[in-house]
Every structure is written in structure tokens, then in C-alpha cells.
């Protein structure tokens, strides 16, 4: 599963409004492992792993010109867009590209995070 949100997307980190992003892309993956019995050609079972989420943020405009992800571990990231909110928890950062072409402070060109869980809610109108 892959989901892409474009336009002004509001980002919250552990409940605090942190930034806006031009694009948020999420890919969900799940590993599986075959269990084989000795001498059998076909697996006797398949164990499914838990879903993992890879979130890629593009052109992130930070409030306060700070680089928030580098010191964080096991955090929550909420994405608000078009009347709904998606919250990723158990987040860890993987890659950060900052500065932009002109070295613009407070702008991340790209940030890649992983998350253990995803919840989705619609606004109450």
C-alpha cells in the first residue's frame, strides 16, 4: 500500500504543531516467513509479520528553524490533510536532507521516517 498527500500538509510531533510539508508519501510493508517441514516441498505455514510504515516528507517548512528529528526516538507524527488526520507512532528517523538549494534555514528538503503503527481519524466537521 502506498499513499501520497500533496499540498499544504500540517505535521504535529508528539502533539505540537511542528511544520508543514509539500508532500507526504507513506508506504506500508509487511514481511512474511515460510515454515517448512523436513522433506516437504511446500511450506506448512506462513507467519505474517507486523506492518511497518515508511514515511517520506518532502519540502518540510519548520517552525522555529529547528531540526526536530535528529534527537528523537519512539515519537508520534500526526499528518492533517483534507479534513482528516493520520497518526504514526513508534516513529524513528532514518534520513534527513536539510537546507534546500540555497541553504534555506528552517527547510528540510526530505525526511524519511519509519513507524510501527498507523491510526486514521476523520474530523468531526
Image (spheres, grey):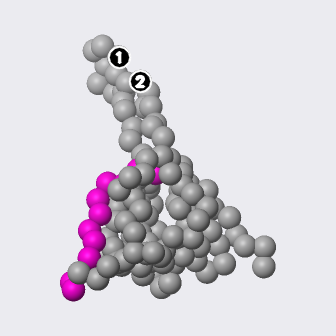
Q: Residue at x 37, y 33 (%)?
A: 33
Position of residue 17 measured from the top left corner of the image (x, y, whole percent): 57, 70
Q: Residue at x 29, y 24 (%)?
A: 41
Q: Is residue 72 left or right of residue 109?
A: right
Q: Earlier in the sequence, mark 1 or mark 2?
A: 1
* Residue 86 position by quadrant: bottom right
Mark carried by residue 89: none
Q: Nearer the viewer, residue 41 or 90?
A: 90
The N terminus, quarter of image:
bottom left
> Which residues make up the magenta segment?
91-102
Find out whether residue 53 is within the magenta segment: no
Position of residue 112 measured from the top left corner of the image (x, y, whole percent): 34, 61
What is the C-alpha distance between the residues marked 1 and 2? 6 Å
Can you identify the residue that label 2 sits on?
44
Q: Is residue 84 left or right of residue 118?
A: right
The C terminus, quarter of image:
bottom right
Specify few, some or many for label 1: CA neighbours under 10 Å numbering under 14, 14-19, or 20 or more.
Answer: few
Mark carried by residue 37: 1
Position of residue 14 measured from the top left corner of the image (x, y, whole percent): 57, 57
Q: Nearer the viewer, residue 65 or 57?
A: 65
Q: Secondary structure at mark 1?
A: loop
Q: Is residue 24 left or right of residue 86?
A: left
Pointer 1 with pointer 2, Cβ within 8 A = yes
Q: Is residue 119 above or below residue 105?
A: above
Amino acid at each position: 500500500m502506498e499513499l501520497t498527500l500533496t499540498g499544504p500538509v500540517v505535521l504535529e510531533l508528539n502533539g505540537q504543531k511542528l511544520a508543514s510539508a509539500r508532500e507526504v508519501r507513506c508506504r506500508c510493508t509487511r514481511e512474511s516467513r515460510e515454515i517448512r517441514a523436513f522433506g516437504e516441498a511446500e511450506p506448512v505455514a506462513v507467519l505474517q509479520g507486523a506492518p511497518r510504515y515508511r514515511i517520506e516528507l518532502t519540502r518540510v517548512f519548520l517552525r522555529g528553524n529547528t531540526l526536530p528529528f535528529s534527537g528523537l526516538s519512539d515519537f508520534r507524527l500526526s499528518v492533517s490533510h483534507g479534513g482528516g488526520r493520520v497518526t504514526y507512532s513508534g516513529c524513528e528517523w532514518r534520513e534527513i536532507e536539510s537546507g534546500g538549494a540555497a541553504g534555506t534555514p528552517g527547510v528540510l528538503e526530505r525526511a524519511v521516517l519509519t513507524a510501527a503503527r498507523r491510526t486514521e481519524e476523520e474530523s468531526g466537521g
